[in-house]
Amino acid sequence: MKIPARRLLLLLLPSIAAVLLAAGFCQASENAAVWRTGIGIDYFSRTISSDNNTRASKASATLVTAREEVELRPGLAFDLAAGLSLSSFNGLAFSNLPITIDYEAGAVSSLFVGAGFRARLLRHGKLEIEGVGRFVYCLGSTKGWTLEGFAVEGHATGRPAWIEATLGPRISLVAGGKLVPFLTISGNWFSGSFKMTETLGDLSGSEKKTVRAKGFIEISLGARYQVSKRACFTAEAGFLPRSGGVDGALSAGLTYRF
């Protein structure tokens, strides 16, 4: 899944522009905007298809995130995020190489960037409905290993890349206490690629697999807990039903308001 820099910029531009506008707005009226700095950890496991949907395998990732959020006014916020990802595409088979490789080498360290927003749509009594969205782009580093058991020297390298985008409504129960439970129902788009390169003696070749997730709808249950006037802890568990099973996602994070 090769994503040209121009296309990536176009995908991120709306959120980046919003954050930059927010910064300018903050300078014009310091009391109107609130900045929050956060750290978090996320995990997901997705069933993916490749080879024109004829083969299924698993993709998973653990993300360690640093995030900066600006809330322009109560109920309207944008954020940018970046961090480290350990991305695994175990189970992919590469047969168009000198020697077929069934990839089982585990996670590849990666860097990722992301952008997101949340906007209050409606508040009635103790119920609040927001629109929430997020985009993440992850470009993995190259992982190499030696091919053993052959009469000649062999070496292989693999490099993953993936994107994930989510968009949907979030319903929160705001009862006035420190704990705010919420339910999110969103569309979840996940696609990626894994490029494998192999050298065995005088033979060499490369092959790239393009993959897509089988599930599309994500249902998440979570809660925000106001630890103090400035610190807030959030945790969430997501379920992605698909044909023949359910995939999952977990996240937890802490934000601090300066």
Image (cartoon, grey):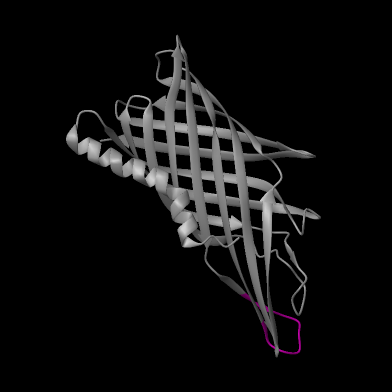
Left or right position of 181 against 254: right
Left or right position of 30 against 133: left
Left or right position of 130 against 49: left
Residue drawn where x is 52% and y is 60% of the image? 139
x and y percent of residue 137 in the render? 51, 53
Judging depth in this view, the residue of 242 and 156 nearest the camera is 242
Residue 9: name its quadrant.
bottom left
x and y percent of residue 123 in the render? 44, 15
- What's drawn in magenta, residue-wise? 145-154
Q: Is residue 148 magenta?
A: yes
Please indicate, yes or no, whether residue 54 appears anywhere in the rendered image.
Answer: yes
x and y percent of residue 72 in the render? 30, 31
Left or right position of 110 against 160: left
Q: Looking at the picture, does residue 196 appear above or below residue 185?
A: below
Q: Looking at the picture, does residue 182 appear above or below residue 162?
A: above
Residue 220: name its quadrant.
top right
Which secondary structure is most common in the magenta stretch? loop
Residue 54: name its quadrant.
bottom right
Residue drawn where x is 29% and y is 38% of the image? 22
Please indicate, yes or no, whether residue 66 appears anywhere in the rendered image.
Answer: no
Q: Is residue 225 magenta?
A: no
Judging depth in this view, the residue of 218 and 88 nearest the camera is 218
Residue drawn where x is 30% and y is 44% of the image? 20
Residue drawn where x is 68% and y is 55% of the image? 211
Quarter of the rendering occupied by the N terminus: bottom right
Q: Looking at the picture, does residue 211 appear above or below residue 101?
A: above
x and y percent of residue 67 in the render? 38, 44
